[in-house]
Image (tube, helix red, strand yellow):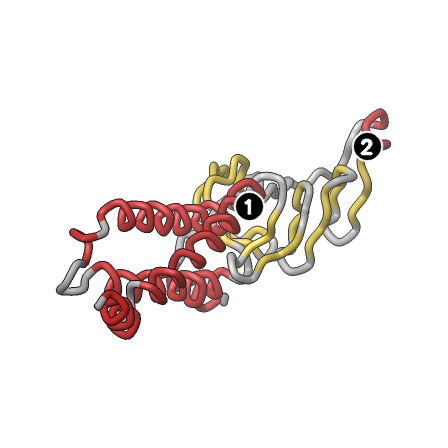
Amino acid sequence: SAVLATLFFPRSRRLGNMLVLDAARRTDEEGEEVVLPPLRRVVGPYWPMMAFVTYPLILGVSGMVLWRVFLKPEGGISGHVPLFLTWAAMTVSLVVALFFTACGDPGILVRVGNVASAERGACRWEERSLSYRPRRAAYDTDCGVVVEEFDHVCPWTGTAIGKKNMPAFQAFLCALFSTLALDVVLLTVLGTDMGEGAFSKSGM
């Protein structure tokens, strides 16, 4: 993953095990470049899974549906325009939802080494990150960062799921299951010549 990160994201900055692709930056007193919130584009430690498994699976199945159903010589898109537009919109929404889940900030919290005594009741010291964290935040060993309202790490999206990318993740799940169901129906009903032959014989 480190070698791939160097090849694909040479300008990224590592934050724990996360790769920050786009964020505000400043130079600290020691001359080191430090990333600052907001973190606009971040990928998780399992981003190769997302890039080389999840996206190819989605695009591969979508390509199969497009070829077998909508690009057939007979009928094709012209015979199923409303169905094609519905399928295309659902497929695009799936791809977009995955992007915002996988490349969005899950809710990474910056390191806080000292808090006011009045706030210590609402925070806990996290030894692994050497930082105070809110009670609903958690340190994830896979990502190496504290994530606000951390839920889990999803290898299919390659990143942690937390407060900030949870809506995109829920949209991704809804789009995934609905698009997959539609793909199965399209391939079963319209994508096989056997099915068409059976319908034609029954009509005779």
Amino acid type, callout 2: Ala
* Residue for point 38% across, 65% down: 56
Q: Residue furthest front?
A: 204
Residue 31 in sight here: no
Above or below, 43 against 55 in this view is above
10 Å crowding of disc 1: few (<14), some (14-19), many (20+)? some
Above or below, 167 against 193 in this view is above
Q: Residue furthest bottom?
A: 194
* Residue for point 18% across, 64% down: 72
Element on which disc 1 rests: helix
Q: Would you identify the image quadrant in which residue 17 lies? A: bottom right
Q: Would you identify the image quadrant in which residue 111 lies? A: top right
- The location of residue 82, given as percent across then percent down, is 26, 45
* Residue for point 58% across, 43% down: 166
- The location of residue 40, given as percent across then percent down, is 47, 40
Front residue of 185/95: it is 185
Front residue of 165/77: it is 77
Element on which disc 2 rests: helix
> How far apart are the two marked residues, 2 and 1, measured between alpha carbons?
28 Å
Amino acid type, callout 1: Gln
Q: Name the N-terminal-most of marks 2 and 1.
A: 2
Residue 172 in sight here: yes
10 Å crowding of disc 2: few (<14), some (14-19), many (20+)? few
Front residue of 126/156: it is 156
For the C terminus, the image quarter is: bottom left
* Residue for point 29% across, 49% down: 83
Q: What residue is disc 1 on?
A: 170
Q: What residue is disc 2 on?
A: 122
Image check: 120 left or right of 192? right
- The location of residue 156, given as percent across then percent down, is 52, 61
